[in-house]
Image (cartoon, rainbow, N blue to C red):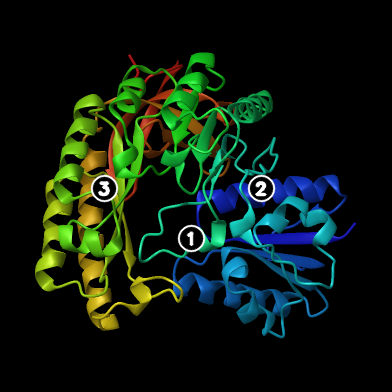
Amino acid sequence: MKRVAISTLGCKTNQFESAAMIEQLKAAGYSIVPFCEPADIYIINSCTVTARTDAETRRLIRRARRLNLASRIVATGCYAQVAPGELEKMPELDSVLGNREKLNISSLLESTEHSVSDITAISQAEPLKLTSFAEHTRAFLQIQNGCNSFCSYCIVPYARGASRSVSPADILQGMRDLAANGFKEIVLTGIHLGAYGLDLPLPTSLTALVGQIDAEFIVPRLRIGSVEPNEVSEELLALMAQSKSICPHLHLPLQSGSDSVLKRMGRPYGSDFFRNLIGRISAALPEAFIGADVIAGFPGETEAEFNETVKMCEELPFSDLHVFPYSSRPGTKAAGMPGHLPAQIVTERAARLRSIAKMKKTRFLERFAGKELGVLVQGYDEKTGYCRGLSRNYIQTTFAGEKSFTNEEVTILITGCNGDVCSGSSTGGKALSGLTAT
């Protein structure tokens, strides 16, 4: 039995696809081992959002070769899709496979040929099947792939192709399969979730799909991945507000608080729209976790434009920010724009936004001191006697508990917060639905 190790970079879609590849490889007779151990075959599931992630892929390829000089090393994922020629030049690498090739990874893994399909020619979703997941309590389910937006800084449409939706029937069956295997929380993932359903023969929407899942109550907890600001509808917020299963958690790619920068980025909304949206989310879901992506140092970003972003991030009730220093991607419109900033300025601006993010996270967590939350227990440390888990509104929590709590949603009284994690104590009850236990 050959040993295979997989390292995954990037988004939840990539994490889902790695889990699906693992399931496929196990069925084909391979043994899966940690990436840090000697293996016969190493797979690097790459990301290409920034130059830094490209460099990390190359580093992992070289690391794999050092772990076993006789191993076979395969690169797949988005970097492999958009720049196979770059990777093929690496002497450590044996094979390059594109994103579509993940569907047949078990049959291509030991091929001596590089294989990267034209992703832009694919018009229908080809969903990977998945009935298990490494976390054992939470699973990701890919419902959509690709993107039609072509924001000026983004290479993803070239790596993932056009927006393609999985049929509602296949999604519901995938949900049922995961639930039957014991998963209590499922996270819906995709590259452009808000475009879900628009390309299907019978067009539908993300809100309609989520409503179907919620009505069937397949799992106790349903979490929605990142959604574009202009695609968070009033209907979706209303559904989330009255639901017993949909987690009060939204992640929004803001990218900038400056209208002029948003326009250069090709984003389809302005700062006033975004401010209004956050107000509506806070009104509908007062205890929701609201995260956002922000890019620091976009080409031509002036000090005044950056300060507009700083002001918005300081004023709005974000729970956390994912800050990305701008990194030029060949093949994007932004790469050819004038006014690329010195690396030092980009780094300084990213650091300032991260300090705001830290403050926002601390303030959000402190709001829940003295309150009870339903926490899905993800693990138990036998040495310390402590459980770790995640609340519906995305708060990492630790508390003294029992191993039997694993994969149960229990009621926790939050007693304090330290950094990104809250501590608490079990009240002895099980939280079956809702955010705050009663």
- Residue that carries the numbered disc 1 in the rendered image: 156
- Residue that carries the numbered disc 2 in the rendered image: 19
Q: Mark 2 belongs to which amino acid?
A: Ala
* Rendered image: mark on residue 258: none
Measure the C-alpha gap from mark 2 to mark 3: 30 Å
Judged left or right of residue 5, residue 280 is left
Q: Residues within 10 Å of mark 3 (few under 14, many from 20)?
A: many
Give how far across and how far down residue 276 sits, in percent. Answer: 16, 38
Give the secondary structure at mark 3.
helix
- Position of residue 328 relative to residue 222, above or below, is below
Is residue 37 something that shows in the picture?
no
Is there CB contact under 8 Å for labels 2 and 3?
Answer: no
- Residue that carries the numbered disc 3 in the rendered image: 361
Give the secondary structure at mark 1.
helix
* In-front residue for pair 356/48: 48
Judged left or right of residue 185, residue 290 is left
Measure the C-alpha gap from mark 1 to mark 3: 28 Å
Sequence order check, earlier mark of 1 and 3: 1
Measure the C-alpha gap from mark 2 to mark 1: 21 Å
Give how far across and how far down residue 255 sits, in percent. Answer: 28, 57
Quarter assignment of residue 338:
bottom left
Identify the residue at horizontal 62%, vertical 43% (top origin): 125
